[in-house]
């Protein structure tokens, strides 16, 4: 029996690893269960916003993340003809990390694995969650399986950091609202694009979207909307046709794309918007995508997850001092984080709906909104504070309507 820990975390994604580092640094013993055998995955980029960068700094991971990734201060939005609609300048933000950082997700995970293990966390790779154990109406551990063998861990609190399809979430019976988006995406890493340094670029057109972001010394992260097509139907059209489709929107991708020689170098996914009614139960808490899955267009999922990790570590610390891991005690974490995640999730939802819609009115409003933000730096700063996850007060309807181009 691998035994006992203060905290058992199911999943060893970025949120779980960040939580493990924080907990161990506070002297709270942690075991992580991860069904994958290692952090290796399909090469993809991940964009960190100022709120997530502040957490990476707190964890002692920012400098190394900067070495493996690329910082961009400008987020440029262009239409399909290459006309610039918006140059959003993160330099306007009053924040020490007033830039975006895009890096290979696997590299960041490896870095956090290193920090978590160095702090003393125990990682069990190839171990899948099976069920929660309960005592006196409270979760007190997990049963898991490694190579067909069942085993158990006893813990004062179990954290479900097992992503959008969370089984911990199902086990505790929270109410889940899921919205599946109609458009799917292909993502991957291509070669470097000369001249793109310091800039993240997005092309928008009704039903189409292409994001290209420098992601490390020799790489560009691309994020391409294939609309309602399945992966099989895109594959049937052939890699040459897919490359031509992307390069037609962004001619600067031509050389960078030559290294992308196989479909296995890309990941296909259909985003969802998942919200739950509560994040905690007796002896259990949800973290990151298991508590909130949002459209990646906003580039906030991992950043919210990192902030959740810090907040949950603080709450667990207080629970440990009080010797009380009941739902009522863990609720502090939910109070701190849930509303914020909902504001950002809704923002991601309407910005992507706006950007991809072919409704003529929404299309006009979107263009108008982007051009207005380009001119009005004060409003641009407000909009960026939401995108960057660093707003202080929940933005009011009037502010949102101004940002959305509905009000002058
Ligand atoms: C293509 C794509 C691009 C994205 N781009 C961005 C971006 O640029 N910026 C951004 O902020 N966000 C982005 N996101 C969202 C971001 O990746 C997620 O919000 C973030 O990774 C959530 O982290 P997590 O640790 O909560 O979950 P995950 O990263 O999903 O980790 C969950 C872990 O749990 C493990 N697991 C699941 N079930 C079990 C089980 N039963 N037993 C044991 N282990 C289990 C999984 O193997 C996995 O390792 C993107 C998402 C996608 C899909």
Image: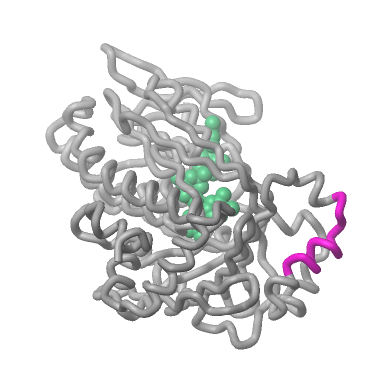
Q: In this view, does 268 lie to the left or right of 91?
A: right
Left or right of 135? Residue 255 is right
Toward which corner of the image does residue 219 lie, by quadrant? bottom right
Q: Depth check: 191 or 225 in front?
A: 225
Seen at 51% across and 69% down, the residue is: 102
Please report the residue visible at 63 percent of the width from the left and 53 percent of the height from the top.
40
Is the residue 339 above or below the residue 219 in the image?
A: above
Along the horizontal axis of the image, is 109 left or right of 254?
A: left
Q: Quadrant of residue 288?
A: top left
Q: Using the image as rendered, state which of residue 279 and residue 276 is in the foreground.
A: 276
Asked whether 359 falls inside the magenta stretch, the response is no
Q: Nearer the viewer, residue 67 or 383?
A: 383
Where is residue 265 drawn, in percent x and y? Answer: 74, 59
Residue drawn at (38%, 52%), measured in percent from left and top?
347
Q: Which residue is drawn at 69% across and 53% down?
A: 226
> x, y (%) of residue 42?
67, 54
Residue 178 percent coordinates (x, y): 48, 33
Do we see residue 124 in this rendering? no
Question: Residue 37: where, in percent of width, then height?
Answer: 63, 43
Res. 170 visible in picture? yes
- Span of residues in magenta: 236-246
Total marks shown come to: 0
Please, which residue is most extreme toward the bottom here?
195
């Amino acid at each position: 029996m691998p035994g006992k820990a203060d905290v058992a975390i199911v999943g060893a994604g970025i949120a779980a690893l960040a939580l493990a580092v924080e907990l161990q640094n506070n002297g709270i013993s942690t075991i992580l269960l991860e069904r994958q055998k290692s952090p290796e995955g399909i090469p993809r980029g991940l964009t960190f916003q100022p709120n997530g960068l502040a957490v990476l700094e707190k964890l002692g991971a920012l400098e190394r993340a900067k070495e493996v990734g690329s910082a961009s201060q400008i987020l440029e939005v262009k239409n399909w003809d290459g006309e610039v609609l918006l140059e959003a300048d993160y330099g306007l933000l009053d924040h020490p990390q007033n830039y975006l950082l895009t890096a290979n997700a696997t590299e960041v995970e490896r870095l956090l694995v290193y920090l978590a293990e160095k702090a003393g966390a125990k990682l069990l790779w190839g171990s899948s969650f099976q069920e929660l154990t309960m005592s006196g109406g409270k979760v007190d551990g997990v049963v898991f399986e490694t190579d067909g063998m069942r085993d158990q861990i006893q813990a004062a609190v179990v954290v479900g950091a097992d992503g959008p399809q969370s089984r911990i979430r199902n086990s505790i019976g929270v109410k889940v609202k899921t919205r599946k988006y109609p458009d799917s995406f292909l993502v991957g890493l291509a070669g470097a694009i000369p001249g793109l340094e310091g800039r993240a670029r997005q092309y928008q057109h009704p039903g189409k979207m292409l994001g290209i972001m420098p992601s490390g010394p020799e790489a560009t992260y691309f994020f391409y909307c294939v609309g309602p097509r399945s992966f099989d139907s895109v594959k049937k059209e052939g890699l040459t046709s897919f490359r031509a489709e992307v390069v037609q929107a962004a001619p600067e991708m031509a050389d960078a794309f030559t290294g992308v020689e196989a479909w296995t170098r890309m990941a296909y996914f259909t985003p969802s918007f998942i919200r739950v009614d509560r994040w905690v139960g007796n002896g259990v808490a949800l973290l990151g995508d298991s508590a909130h899955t949002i459209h990646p267009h906003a580039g906030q999922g991992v950043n919210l997850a990192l902030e959740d990790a810090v907040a949950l570590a603080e709450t667990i610390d207080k629970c440990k001092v009080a010797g009380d891991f009941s739902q009522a005690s863990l609720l502090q974490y939910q109070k701190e984080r849930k509303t914020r995640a909902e504001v950002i999730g809704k923002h991601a939802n309407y910005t992507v709906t706006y950007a991809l819609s072919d409704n003529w009115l929404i299309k006009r409003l979107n263009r108008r909104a982007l051009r207005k933000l380009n001119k009005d730096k004060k409003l641009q700063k407000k909009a960026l504070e939401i995108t960057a996850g660093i707003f202080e007060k929940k933005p009011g309807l009037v502010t949102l309507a101004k940002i959305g181009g509905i009000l002058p």
